[in-house]
Amino acid sequence: MSEQVVTHELFEYNEKEPFHIFNITGNADVGDRLKNHWHEELEILYCFRGHCRHYINGVCIVDQPGRLITTNSGFIHNIIPDQELLHSDVLVGCVIIIHPRLIESVFPDYRDIYFTNGRQTSCRQIQSIAVKLSEYAGAGEHGEYDYLYAKS
């Protein structure tokens, strides 16, 4: 039986953005991000299209359009892509990686909070925010108000 490798993913940040936002398409070169990995950041994925399988600490979660999937800090996770969307330019989802210091500035007991993925779909407000963050991720340059909106 082969041993599975789990990598520790590290992110770098600048002062304005204690977060990263990525748009994922069917042909995105996500490399090791699909394999078993963990990081100290909270990860939030909003699914626009498809039905990828996410394994978070061994639990399989199948996404669907409109679903928000949260991966807690330190959880081992990986993604099995939706084969129907591979090698396409279609926007599949938006991933938000949030450094703990940003969350702790609002929720000091953040490290004691555990997020679950029980809901199958999210509300329209969440969809609207995901669309705006996806636009932010796709923009080349950002104005001061753009940073503030994304950070909030």
Image: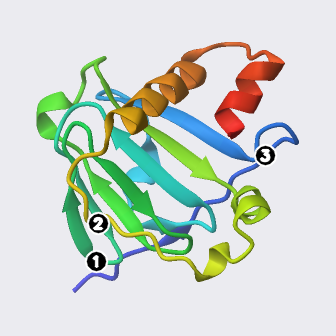
Q: Residue at x 65, y 33 (%)?
A: 150
Q: Nearer the viewer, residue 138 or 108?
A: 108
How many residues crowd around disc 3 within 10 Å: few (fewer than 14), some, or many (20 or more)? Answer: few
Question: What separation in Å lies between label 3 and label 1 (alpha carbons)?
Answer: 29 Å
Q: Position of residue 131 (x, y in %)?
A: 44, 25
Residue 5 circle label: none
Q: Identify residue type, mark 3.
A: Tyr
Seen as rendered, the residue at the extreme right is: 15
Q: Earlier in the sequence, mark 2 or mark 3?
A: 3
23 displayed left or right of 113:
left
Circle 3: element type = loop
Q: Is residue 69 above or below residue 115?
A: above
Count of marks placed on residues: 3
Residue 55 circle label: 2
How many residues crowd around disc 2 within 10 Å: few (fewer than 14), some, or many (20 or more)? Answer: some
Q: Identify residue type, mark 1.
A: Gly
Residue 13 circle label: 3
Q: Quick one: quadrant of the N terminus?
A: bottom left
